Structures are given as C-alpha cells and as structure tokens.
Image (cartoon, helix red, strand yellow):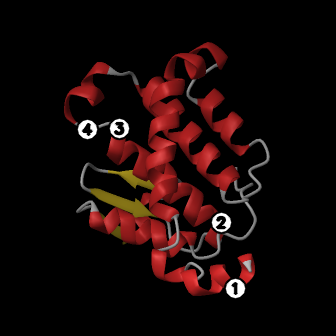
Amino acid sequence: MHEVSGDSGENLDRLTAFVKSKGIQLVYNANIAPALGMSYGGRIAILPGLSKAETFATLVHETAHELLHKAERRTATTKTVRETEAEAVAFVVGKAVGLVTGSASADYIQLYHGNASLLAECLEVIQQTASVILAALEPPIADEVPTDQLAEVAA
C-alpha cells in the first residue's frame, strides 16, 4: 500500500512541531513493521525509511488517532470507526497539501471494513480534525509577505 507520493514540502516539519506541541512523543522504530505507524496515546512511532510523502501521510493518520481516539472516545468507537476516521483525515490533509494518494486510503479503509455510510456518519469529526491539522500546517506569520510589500503591490 505504499502509494502516497508527491512533495510534502515543509509540511512534515510543521506537522512534527505540531505533534510535539501537543506533548506527543514522536519516535522512529523499525520494530513496528509491517505497520507504517502506531499510536500509543501520547506517543507515535513511525517506520523509518519511508519516503517523505509516506512519512507525512502516516504521521497525519497517527496524529488523527491521537486527537480523536483517547479515553472515552476510544472505548465508545470500534476499530473500524477509528481506522476509517484516521485514514480519512490523512486523505483530506494529504490532498490539501498536494500529495498523490492513489487508492491507498480507500484500500486501507476497506481493509478495516469501513464503507461510504460509515464515512458519511464520521464526516463532521473528519472535517474538524483535518481542519485542526491543516491550520497547524499554515506557515508562520513571519513567512508571509510583509505588509509594506503588500502596499507596493496594491499601488
């Protein structure tokens, strides 16, 4: 299922910073294979050696688990729901930053018996979580065009 490609640009660094800002430990661990990533509640492990695009998509998926599937919500949802939500968030965020995912997300969701009606039920949670992650990927204000340059452009 290594089908994610494209250029994640600075987004991997920004996502890593966001994860750390949430107090989540990020490690790279070959022992999780064949899994690409694992979420342990406060800790994410990523398989080393993935492409930058695959690392980014996997980290988004595991970050979604961290944001969505702790405590009460974990026990109130099935594995199918949790995996569908996390992979759908990874798909939305990956598409938004220009990654090419092929059928990887659909294949993954089907692997866990997710389907269109489940996706529809989870849409609000997926959208909200993707929005939180995408907001964290926004460049810092310092990277934006200074207002004096905007004034020159407008003139």
Do the numbered discs 4 and 1 sit on residues whose CB atoms are within 8 Å? no
Q: Mark 4 points at which residue?
A: 70
Mark 2, secondary structure of its residue:
helix
Mark 1, secondary structure of its residue:
helix
Which sits earlier in the primary sequence, circle 2 or circle 1? 2
Mark 4, secondary structure of its residue:
loop
Q: Name the residue under label 2.
A: 53
Q: Name the residue under label 1.
A: 152
Which three-letter amino acid code belongs to the residue tagged 1? Glu
Eye-nearest disc, 2 or 1: 1
| Residue at (43% x, 31% y) in the render | 82
Eye-nearest disc, 4 or 1: 1
Mark 3, secondary structure of its residue:
helix
Which three-letter amino acid code belongs to the residue tagged 2? Ala
Q: Mark 3 points at which residue?
A: 68
Which sits earlier in the primary sequence, circle 1 or circle 3? 3
Which sits earlier in the primary sequence, circle 2 or circle 3? 2
Q: Where is residue 130 in the image (x, y as percent from the top left)?
A: 51, 44
Which sits earlier in the primary sequence, circle 4 or circle 2? 2
Do the numbered discs 4 and 3 sit on residues whose CB atoms are within 8 Å? yes
Which three-letter amino acid code belongs to the residue tagged 4? Lys
